[in-house]
Image (spheres, coloured by chain):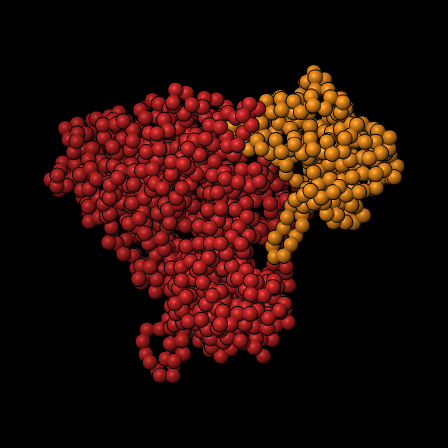
Amino acid sequence: MQAPVSYKLRDQQLWLSADRCIYWEDEQVLIVSDLHFGKTGHFRKHGIAVPQTVYKKDLQRLFHQVQFYRPRKLIVVGDLFHSHENKELELFLKWRNDFPHLEIDLVRGNHDILHQDWYRQANINVVDEELQISQFRFRHDKEECSHDKANALKTGMPYLFSGHIHPGVLLSGMGKQSLRLPCFYFARDFCVLPAFSAFTGTWLMDPDESENIFAIVENKIVQLQ
Amino acid sequence: MVLHNTPGYKIVNDWLASKGLHPFLFQEQAWQHIINGKSGVVNAPTGCGKTFSVFLGTLIDFINKNSGNYKTKSKNGLQLLWITPLRALAKDIGRAMEEVIAELGMQWKVGIRNGDTDVAERQRQKRQMPEALIITPESLHLLLAQKGYPELFRSLQVIAVDEWHELIGSKRGVQVELAISRLCHLPNERKPQVWGISATIGNLEQAREVLLSPLKTMGELVKAEVRKEIVLESILPDEIEKFPWSGHLGLKLAHKVVPIINNSRTALIFINTRGMSETWYQTLLNIAPDLAGAIALHHGSIEQELRIWVEEALHAEKLKAVVCTASLDLGVDFRPVDTVIQVGSPKGVARFLQRAGRSGHSPDAISKIYFLPTHSLELVEAAALKNAIEENFIESREPMTLCFDVLIQYLGTLAISEGFRPDELYHEIITTYCYRDLSEAEWSTILQFITEGGTALQQYDEYKKIEVIDGVYRLTSRRLAMRHRMHIGTIVSESMMKVKFMSGGFIGVIEEWFITRLNPGDVFTLAGRNLELVGIKEMTALVRPSKSKKSIVPSWDGGRMPLSANLGKKLREKFNEAFEVKRATKNSNSGKRDIELEVLKPLFQLQAQLSHVPRADELLIEHIETKDGYHLFVYPFEGRLVHEAMAAILAYRISRITPITFSFAMNDYGFELLSDQPIPVDDTNVMDLFTADDLLTDIQRSANATEMARRKFRDNAVIGGLIFQGYPGEQKKARHLQSSASLLFNVFSEYEPNNLLLRQAYQEVFDQQMEEVRLRNMLERIQHSKIVITFPQQLTPFCFPIKVDSMRENLTSEKLEDRVKRMQAQLER
């Protein structure tokens, strides 16, 4: 695994990891999005035999990141869980109990539909729309800003971290070959995190030249622009 | 029992005689076998009484067995199950059967069961099965998904499989095999007889073996010795282009089609792709405006009602001509059709014959078919076709084997109705041809997959599908059962979008990927109209009519069949004669020569002068250097798929000699490797480069098998029940259960690489996409051939069409046309 890639943003030190997360050093915060935990279980419960190993590996990956950075807080920019409760979440809870001191802030995404008691028991703080910590804001879907806020976006509001769309880029190679890769997408006033879960597709971005794109190529981060 | 002495025969024969008809010999042969309790295959072309061969045989047998009261005996239960691949044919067959039954004064009922059958009719059938039931393979599997299905088939006497040649090479054929294996193993007093009805294919014996495999009998093969005369006439260009390129000549010859249309009652004009059929329709209207109203367009993307209207107008002789695609290859005969025009290569002998057979229906009528080349070299194909038809050299349809996806679906089907015991079912399934090599290990993997869902995390798993209850495998969840029933079938279509006018009214359907590439305001052509895209709303593209002259014609890839092995072989042989023609002119050696080869003489002469015209036992390789780089052209004449795989393998093998990168291009005749450095292929290494040794490993290392398998996997995943397409009318609600085939492919490749469906996707790539067997045969042929390597100073007539095709991708058609003209001018100087 390649070492994380340094990225300075508004004087803050970020580390981008090929494991699809960002470590914010100044605040000791690990930022992830779209983990969709329980998705394989949800499919399997409905008779669609997706291998559960995907979920196990996803959990292990998150677990390793937490051990590696030892963050004070984990911010999930939405879609921590895929759907209703199922047995796979028990495995998450087991893991959660091993890190009782880690704060988890979940900015609610469209998939986060569990009962509030469940989050309370799991020791997860749920934030309904937007979370702000010093000069950064966190919101699941950047498109869902109300109008005045969207305008404010242009006028030097805190930088916005978002998820939801599972950003990807298309790399064209020789002949007719092309590769679709998940990516980090940094625009002037906001960024979009790649979906953490390996059981997610990607939405192709059409980046502007001024924006920064980091593609995740197997276990490396490659800055494209 | 001698047929002629039976009461049934007398009754049926008298009835035929009363209509002035006599049974054909092959019909009587089939009847004799049927009353003897035998099974078999009837080989007969369409339109000469093949339906009657099996249907009347079943009636005769019934009359014989009930000679006292055959007229009054009713509610006999299902006697004859008639499986047909074509929903559209069911009504006509049913009507014909009912007519016979009524005229014989019998009480049989005829039922139809397919996707169009309404609920009330299904209920009626469940209460009292009709004596004859016409059904599609999918609907038959739906019957097997009903509780108590064995009761429906208790009195079944004969299973007829119509158009078996259409089914055998497909997964629908596998469905038929499985259904037959089930019906033959029901605990009935008598096993049903099985009769296939097939047009001529290269492997007729094998077709019989596949169909009858569950019966463990050889069965009979009844051949109708009705030979239809087919006359092929090529539409010759006034001047032969010495540098041909595809897709261009065709439309230039359109004016020659108009008089043919005018001199016919009704003409069918077959075009290979939907996109080109749109263009042809427009072109014909432009050059012959008086045809407006008398000509129509028919292809798979056109709205069904409109297609039905066209078909009915064809029957009623209201149309002079219909521009169509493979959409009119099959189905009921259109009596008024007396002329068929094939535009471009038909790619195979069987397909050409089938199309020719769409004209001239009475058994003694001559079928006339015109061949219109889309580039001049295609004229050789016309000559090759004539020869192939003369020798009845028709392609085989290879049966599919070990289709895990269809089997997984079938197990689900049985699990929701009566359940199954794995040991019993295993022995039943391996009686089919498709699964005869299914190992016990594979079987237990499949059982594990459907009950436990592959790799799982034990106590954290809630996989639910098939459960084992007292040793019986059952699917008890009503929701899952309902979903399964909706997904029964093996035809996986592209994601389609309806096209509708703003003001209402459907025009047809079009591939989603095509529409999503367009922006509102763009104009495209569908069903012969120019349409402006207004917007997309809920899986419907809203359009308005456009007067714009420019429009985008969708290019559908679906119709791009490769040249068949049979036609390729005949084509290579024809080049022998092209050589002869040249010499013949010198020696004035008379004899029957094809006009097509005659007119192509200048082209062959130029080819011989610049390079070489390969004979059947030669492989031609051309090294050409142009400002684009170093080209290597190879001409195996094996169809584009084989060429695609071969190009990749050759590139890989050359790159082992020296580091070098290539780009590829190919058509049905040959392929091109292009590089910026000289390509090291010469007499010393050429045999090694074309060896069949290590073929499989080299394929895996060279061709992009992963990408190909990814595309194939979608079908496997849908059939195998991994992709949830949503309940009708509530697509949105099911979003949380949807995932793309491509994503599943990634997940399985990484986390469950041994998954059976994944393995099957790769196997299908080797078998169908790369046609591994054919590739191997080609290499073995080349090993026994003489390889001729030439170094022409410029592009040759043979390589020109490949070169143009490789430029096509990056250029719009007008720019391409200009550029090709310039190239031609330069070369002919």
Question: Looking at this view, is B738 or B816 the one in front?
Answer: B738
Question: Looking at this view, is A184 or B185 the one in front?
Answer: A184
User: Above or below — where is A85 with respect to B396?
Assistant: above
Determine whether, in the image, residue B223 is placed left or right of residue B752.
left
Q: Colour of chain A?
A: orange
Q: Position of residue B93 (x, y in %)?
A: 33, 39
Determine whether, in the image, residue B777 is placed left or right of residue A127.
left
Q: Residue furthest left?
A: B5
Q: Look at 42% across and 23% down and name the residue there.
A: B468
Determine whether, in the image, residue B70 is placed left or right of residue B475.
left
User: Above or below — where is B737 with respect to B271?
Assistant: above
Does residue B448 show up? Answer: yes
**Quadrant into which the N terminus of chain A falls:** top right
Q: Look at 69% across and 21% down and name the residue there.
A: A97
Does residue B84 show up? Answer: no
Q: Look at 60% across and 25% down and name the residue there.
A: A88
Q: How many marks?
A: 0
Q: Look at 35% across and 33% down and name the residue there.
A: B426
User: Above or below — where is B93 with respect to B349?
Assistant: above
Question: Looking at this view, is B240 or B264 the one in front?
Answer: B240
Chain coloured red here: B
Q: Position of residue B44 (x, y in %)?
A: 28, 49
Q: Position of residue B799 (x, y in %)?
A: 52, 69
Q: Position of residue B676 (x, y in %)?
A: 63, 67
